Amino acid sequence: MFTLRYYCRGRGNEIILKLLEEIKEKHGVTCEVLGLWGEEQEKEVYERHYYVSNPGTIAVVRNAQVEWWTFTDSEIAEFLNRVLYEGRGLLKELCT
């Protein structure tokens, strides 16, 4: 139903990656990590995912559409901590 898609430069932020794994385990939410390694790859991903593909962005995707997004590591970590605590209910709330 929902996918958390994290766009990051290279391997990404370890804290964010750990939170995504915990959310996947606890709530069964699909998580994708798109590590961007260079300008050409960033351009390709941008063309497919539009504005939310900037490195350091996380998007809530439902039915192949971005429903909600935020950026910066601190905001992403805060959001993921809320998802870890509140679960799918928070995602539904954000996407209605």
Image: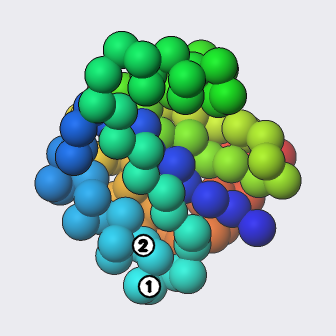
Foreground: 65 or 34?
Answer: 34
The quadrant holding residue 21 is bottom left
Q: Which residue is mark 2?
A: 23
**Image-based side of 32 in relation to 56, left or right:** right
Residue drawn at point x = 34 percent, y = 41 percent? 35
Q: Is residue 12 visible?
A: yes
Residue neighbourhood size for the residue with mark 1, other residues' Cα within 10 Å, grouped as few (<14), some (14–19), many (≥20)? few
The quadrant holding residue 69 is top right
Residue drawn at point x = 23 percent, y = 38 percent? 10
Q: Is residue 54 visible?
A: no
Foreground: 25 or 36?
Answer: 36
Residue drawn at point x = 55 percent, y = 81 percent? 28
**Image-based side of 51 in relation to 31, left or right:** right
Q: Amino acid at mark 2?
A: Ile
Q: Amino acid at mark 1?
A: Lys
Label 2 element class: helix
* Residue 75 percent location from the top left of the image: 33, 35
Q: Which mark is residue 26?
A: 1
**Image-based side of 37 in relation to 28, left or right:** left
In the image, residue 57 sits, relative to residue 21, either above or below, namely: above
Q: Which mark is residue 60?
A: none
Residue drawn at point x = 36 percent, y = 14 percent? 39
> Do the CB atoms of the residues marked 1 and 2 lie less than 8 Å apart?
yes
Q: CA distance from mark 1 to mark 2?
A: 5 Å
Residue at the extreme left of the image, as rendered:
14
* Residue 31 percent location from the top left of the image: 50, 63
Quadrant location, the N terminus = bottom right
In the image, residue 11 sits, relative to residue 49, either above or below, namely: below
* Residue 92 percent location from the top left of the image: 73, 58
What is the total number of numbered labels drawn onto the structure image? 2
Label 1 element class: helix
In the image, residue 5 sits, relative to residue 51, either above or below, namely: below
